[in-house]
Amino acid sequence: MTRIPAPRRLMAAAVALATGLALTACGGGTTGDTGGSLVDKAGAPSTPAGTLRMAAWQETPSMDPVRTTTQNGMLIFPEYDTLTVVDAEFQPQPWLATSWTQPDSKTWEFKLRDDVTFHDGSKFDAETVKLNLERAKKVTGGPYTNIYAPISEVEAVDPATVRVSFSTPQPNFPYSMSTVAGAMISPKAVKDETDLTRAAAGSGGWIWQKEAHREGAEHVYKANPDYWNKDAVRAETISVKIMQEDNARLNALQSGQVEVMSTLQPDQADAAQSAGLRVLTDLTSTGTFLIMDREGKKVPAFAKPEVRQAIGLLLDRDAYNKALLSGKGDPKGGGFAAPGSPWHDASLDGFNKADAAKAKELLAQAGYPDGFTFEVGNAPVIRQINETIAQLLKEGGITMKIVDVANGQYTADVRRGRFPAGYFVPTSIDIYQWWSRTVSTKGIYNPFKLDDLDDLEKTFDEALEMTGDGARKPLMNRLQRETVERGVAFPLSQNPRSAALAASVRATQQPVFAPEDIAPRPHYLWTK
């Protein structure tokens, strides 16, 4: 198997953040375990029992994996299986696919399990994967266009072998198949063109309960009695409660209303630790401010390179880290890759350092000495972030208005072009996804149909044609630098990505907090 680079081993454990011990994804260090081991095989129920209650921060717009984002994985993974999963070093490992090879640079071939049955009775096989990928490629406006679009052909070689060919090399495709994008829908649902907005058609360890769903409040799943991996299903019921407010999720965990919470904020970490909760945290994403309206279709000022450069100089990373992340982020990098990862470019450390005076000069040169006004979308989980960014931009006279959007609609509104700019958290360990999903004009965040990065698109394609990550790195370094220099996107910090678990949570094997997830998946977990 080809392996994507891993910055650092991550294991589920309690983290002593107050004393500086963290489960980081970069640079080595020490792991604290003040809450005790999660693994308890002897005490685990022999058959699924009890309820594992989890708290997510938003409702999903759809139960169709290809139409929802990785941020909604908590609501997808109980119901659906993915082709692969990742291990503690963030490397793709078998799940529905048992192994994979790369016959050539533009082809991946997967061997598949032959004992998987969907909840509707359909069998999983190579034809199922073919149907899923071909269907996903046809979906317009979905969040994974960058993953599916390069697929040129999918061939069911035999019932247990599927071959996926691409128009350009896709070195990270097995990793991508461990995310929501790799979730498999039943062939019956695909052929029947079933509307999965509020229905489900998976083969996962639990079955989504339509009658128990409370819109915007709770999803309920019951253990699948015919699941192929019985060891992974220890809880009889999974309840995922939707709690938009950060403090509501933490309070629910502390008071025993839930056992797992997603999206623990940096300023909550110490309180969670002091309360005896297990805190899982790493640095695998980059807080990023992305300017999409670079031709000024909604906001004329953004068409001026000087204006975009000024914004970059106003976004003081040190101030952002101290004010918002309680000093727990890593603000020094001027690039988008985590320090310690193979993609980190040390020459970008300190690059584009904050300079409000220079920013004001650039704004004046562009004809905006008194600044200008624009809007960004907002959800409760990023309100503090937006407010911090707005305060930093105010230093240059720029007014950023924060507009609340409907629950679960933030990225959908962005993809529709409702806002000219916004906050995102692209992965900082997978450089391919960083470019193709977040920055590329071929990706999902180009609602204004720009072509201003065509030369950089050619650079990316050139890198993909090379053999090995070492050969690609200089070109990837260039993409990071020019993304900032051209005022396309600005890295704010390596953000702590955190979740928390109650002390009562146990596991039959050490769970993995996958880089694209907002909380551990329910597999192997149970409550004591």
Image (spheres, helix red, strand yellow):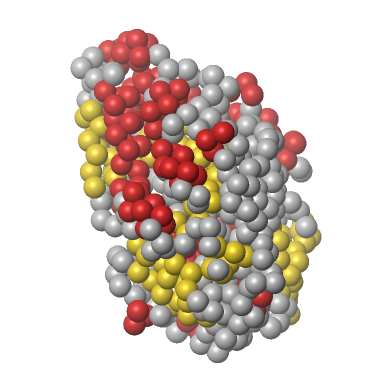
273 is higher (above) or lower (below) than 340: below
Residue 38: percent from left, percent from top: 63, 59
Instruction: Residue at the far bottom: name it.
Output: 121
Residue drawn at x 61%, y 77% as measured from the top left: 45
**The quarter of the displayed image where residue 292 is located:** top left
Give coordinates of residue 157: x percent, y percent. 73, 76
| Residue 369: x %, y % from top left | 23, 14
On screen, 350 above or below 188?
A: above
Q: Nearer the viewer, residue 429 or 20?
A: 20
For the point 33% across and 53% down, which residue is it? 248
- Rendered position, 180 above or below 386: below
Residue 346, image quadrant: top right
Looking at the rendering, in which quadrant would you find the C terminus? bottom right
Left or right of 9 in this view: 237: left
Front residue of 187 and 257? 257
Q: Is residue 83 above or below residue 38?
A: below
User: 17 and 318: which one is in front?
Assistant: 17
Viewport quadrant of the N terminus: bottom right
Image location (x, y in percent) of residue 100: 75, 64
Q: Residue at (54%, 19%) from the top-left corner?
A: 350
Whether residue 484 is visible to the viewer of this picture, yes or no, is: yes
Q: Residue at x 54, y 75 (%)?
A: 235
Q: Is residue 59 left or right of residue 504?
A: left
